[in-house]
């Protein structure tokens, strides 16, 4: 007998369970002992953590997009006839398979349950198998190691190898993001995991652009360090579950995701490049052999990056207020996310004011 059989016939077992509780264990008959064993077994099955992960029951309506596991469905007070039919088919399948006579067995799902995009499912399986971001992380790490060797041996022969490794990692990074966009049909910035990966993409992109202009290897170092760190942070959030989950209703707006979230996360990526450049300036300034011209070049890089970061973070924060006004009827609510965005904008403004006033200037 299956777990579903007991849940489906709970009204028949309730009197027996009541009787079991009223009788002292010393007076239990074989029937009572068997019932107690079944009850304990059912309790253990219901509490297995992996039982909640097997989400194979499609939603019953178009308003609900969440797939559920059989145990989650059976925990509901009411189960629809369509979902009951699927559970019965599963039950029959396992009964047949236990006798090694299930060849040619097919499930028959009501076509009204859900319009399933098979191509999207195939792309998602393909995405999970290839693991684009794992591969881009490995290439960034190898490029960073090779860069370290190039500094140790002070040789420019390593530069083409470094650029090839970094460029290959960046291409995989882009493909991974585009693949997610195709699968989810929305911009790749709807969750914390996606935002971190996208910020990492922006950081590496800006670093490569600056390296193309400056050709000093400093931008390569900043891009590789930032890319590796953000990959690791992103994987920390990916470990919590499916990274291709459905959006909450308030975020399910491709227009605002495309405009507001993409703009502000782009600004965050540039901000990180600027911050890492600033740290490199401090490290270089502490070295005796560093030339003043080299420090001046880094200083100018930080200034340009801060201007770009200010534009995108300020513009993105204003767009977020407009989105909040349309969604919740207020432009600003002083919640933690809004305060955090405002603090980043104010930080950029402070840095620029310090430069204009002469309080922050390069070493002469």
Image (spheres, rainbow, N blue to C red):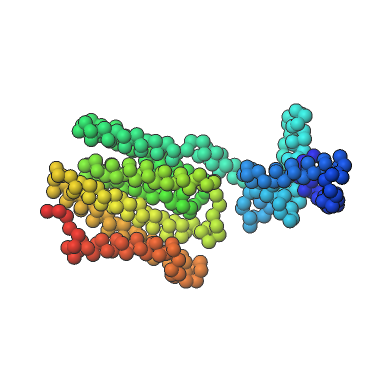
Which corner quadrant of the image does residue 290 belong to?
Answer: top left
Residue 53 image point, x, y percent: 62, 44
Q: Is residue 29 visible?
A: yes
Residue 32 image point, x, y percent: 85, 44
Q: Residue at x 28, y 64 (%)?
A: 349
Q: Residue at x 54, y 46 (%)?
A: 241
Q: Is residue 113 visible?
A: no
Q: Is residue 21 left or right of residue 241?
A: right
Give the total number of marks visible in the rendering. 0
Q: Residue at x 43, y 62 (%)?
A: 337
Q: Residue at x 26, y 32 (%)?
A: 149
Q: Is residue 182 left or right of residue 34?
A: left
User: In this view of the protein, which residue sits in the foreground, 177 or 338?
Assistant: 338
Residue 1 image point, x, y percent: 80, 39
Q: Is residue 37 left or right of residue 364?
A: right
| Outermost residue, top side | 100
Q: Is residue 254 above or below residue 200?
A: below
| Outermost residue, bottom side | 330
Residue 364 image point, x, y percent: 12, 53
| Outermost residue, left side | 364
User: In this view of the protein, which residue sits in the foreground, 336 or 249?
Assistant: 336
User: In this view of the protein, which residue sits in the foreground, 147 or 300?
Assistant: 147
User: In this view of the protein, which residue sits in the foreground, 260 or 38?
Assistant: 38
């Amino acid at each position: 007998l299956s777990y579903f059989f007991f849940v489906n016939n709970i009204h028949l077992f309730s009197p027996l369970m009541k009787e079991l509780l009223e009788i002292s264990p010393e007076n239990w008959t074989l029937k009572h002992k068997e019932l107690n064993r079944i009850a304990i077994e059912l309790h253990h099955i219901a509490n297995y953590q992996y039982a909640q992960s097997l989400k194979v029951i499609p939603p019953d309506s178009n308003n609900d997009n969440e797939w559920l596991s059989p145990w989650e469905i059976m925990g509901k007070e009411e189960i629809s006839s369509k979902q009951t039919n699927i559970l019965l088919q599963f039950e029959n399948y396992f009964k047949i398979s236990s006798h090694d006579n299930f060849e040619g067995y097919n499930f028959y799902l009501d076509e009204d349950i859900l319009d399933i995009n098979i191509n999207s499912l195939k792309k998602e399986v393909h995405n999970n198998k290839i693991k684009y971001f794992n591969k881009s992380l490995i290439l960034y790490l190898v490029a960073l190691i090779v860069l370290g060797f190039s500094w140790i041996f002070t040789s420019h022969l390593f530069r083409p190898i470094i650029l090839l490794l970094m460029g290959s990692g960046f291409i995989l990074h882009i493909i991974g993001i585009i693949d997610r966009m195709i699968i989810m049909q929305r911009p790749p910035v709807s969750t914390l995991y996606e935002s971190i990966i996208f910020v990492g993409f922006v950081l590496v992109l800006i670093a490569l652009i600056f390296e193309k202009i400056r050709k000093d290897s400093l931008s390569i170092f900043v891009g590789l360090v930032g890319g590796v760190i953000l990959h690791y942070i992103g994987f920390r959030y990916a470990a919590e579950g499916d990274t291709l989950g459905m959006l909450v209703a308030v975020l399910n707006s491709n227009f605002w995701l495309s405009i507001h979230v993409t703009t502000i996360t782009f600004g965050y990526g540039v901000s990180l490049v600027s911050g890492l450049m600033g740290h490199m300036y401090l490290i270089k300034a502490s070295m005796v052999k560093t030339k003043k011209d080299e420090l001046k070049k880094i200083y100018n890089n930080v200034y340009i990056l801060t201007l770009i970061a200010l534009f995108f973070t300020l513009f993105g924060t204003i767009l977020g207020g407009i989105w909040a006004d349309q969604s919740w009827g207020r432009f600003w609510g002083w919640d933690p996310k809004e305060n955090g965005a405002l603090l980043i904008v104010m930080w950029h403004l402070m840095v620029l004011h310090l430069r204009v006033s002469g309080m922050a200037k390069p070493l002469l």
